[in-house]
Image: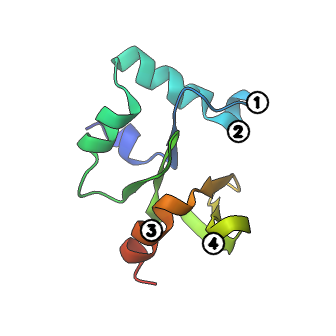
Amino acid sequence: MSNYLLQASYFPGCTMGGGAEESGEPMKLALEKMGVKLYELEGMLTGSDFLRISKSVIVNLSKIQKLIPALSGRFEAVLMNDLKVIISRQYVNELKKRLGI
């Protein structure tokens, strides 16, 4: 795994919208060029600081600045680059376990 990938804050799937930088467009393009699907990347990142937090996002836990409770059992993570991502409620228990909270 390249150092570039391990330094990433998060990996968006192909369904995220928004501006190029905020949506992670450069990372999506890198993944597409590598021919890697998000679920395949998730498998490659097992045992690292990365965790799937929704159907379309894998986040680097070491890049989370703060967590904010959101509606319906979800959380919002603010990353070191001030990007905000939603943690789906089905992934919250694993997130808490991995962060020791």
In front of the other: 21 or 73: 73
Amino acid type for the residue under numbered disc 2: Glu
- The circle on residue 19 is 1
Quarter that holds the N terminus = top left
Disc 4 to disc 1, C-alpha distance: 23 Å
Disc 3 to disc 1, C-alpha distance: 27 Å
Disc 3 to disc 2, C-alpha distance: 22 Å
In front of the other: 86 or 33: 86
Q: Position of residue 58 (x, y in %)?
A: 46, 47
Counting residues from the N terminus, which is met first, the one under dot 3 or under dot 1?
1
Counting residues from the N terminus, which is met first, the one under dot 3 or under dot 2?
2
Q: Quadrant of residue 43?
A: top left
| Secondary structure of the residue carrying numbered label 2 | helix
Residue position for label 4:
66
Amino acid type for the residue under numbered disc 1: Gly
Residue position for label 2:
22
Q: Position of residue 72 (x, y in %)?
A: 68, 66
Q: Position of residue 84 (x, y in %)?
A: 69, 55
Looking at the image, can residue 29 be seen? yes
Residue position for label 3:
95
